[in-house]
Amino acid sequence: MTYQYIQLAYLDTIAGDDPQLRQTLLEMVQAELSAAVPEMNQALEDQQWEELHSIVHKLKSTLAFIGNQELTTLNQDMLSCLEERNYEADFGTWLSKYDHLSGPIRKELQQELAN
């Protein structure tokens, strides 16, 4: 199936011919992406910069499985600012965009999981 927001070539390469591993990876990506926005928003609200860095850094590898360049770039921009301790960056706007982008991605992941 062809999708607009996800490209699963890397995930398929990792899973190889193992459909159970593929399913597990899809479920992991879906769960991590679904939890990320609320966790990031809470860390930002509490100004827990190390926690926010941890979440964004973990997503770096998760996003590789999705293959969405726009979300990957957004994540890298956030990660760079956090690593530079640039806490004046507009994380609120970034997280809003992250939430907006992740919605259709999660929907397509759910469709793939149902197949």
Image (spheres, helix red, strand yellow):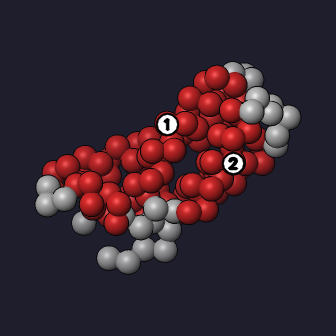
Which amino acid lies under the numbered mark 1 shown in the image of this protein? Lys
User: Is residue 50 shown left or right of residue 17?
Assistant: right
Regarding residue 4, the answer to whether it shows in the image is yes
- Circle 1 residue: 58
Tell me residue 44's x, y (percent): 71, 30
Circle 2 — which element? helix
Direction front: furthest residue: 84
N-term-proximal mark, 2 vs 1: 1
User: Is residue 111 shown left or right of residue 24?
Assistant: right
Direction right: furthest residue: 88
Tell me residue 30's x, y (percent): 40, 48
- On screen, 39 above or below 113? above
Near-viewer residue (49 or 79): 79
Tell me residue 108's x, y (percent): 42, 64
- As drawn, the label of residue 77 is 2
Which amino acid lies under the numbered mark 2 shown in the image of this protein? Asp
For the C terminus, which image quadrant?
Answer: bottom left
At label 1, counting other C-alpha atoms closer than 10 Å, the crowd grade (few under 14, some 14-19, many 20 or more) is: few
- On screen, 1 above or below 15? below
Q: Residue at x 43, y 58 (%)?
A: 66
- As drawn, the label of residue 70 is none
Q: Residue at x 77, y 42 (%)?
A: 92
Circle 1 — which element? helix
Q: Residue at x 80, y 31 (%)?
A: 87
At label 2, counting other C-alpha atoms closer than 10 Å, the crowd grade (few under 14, some 14-19, many 20 or more) is: some
Regarding residue 38, the answer to whether it shows in the image is no
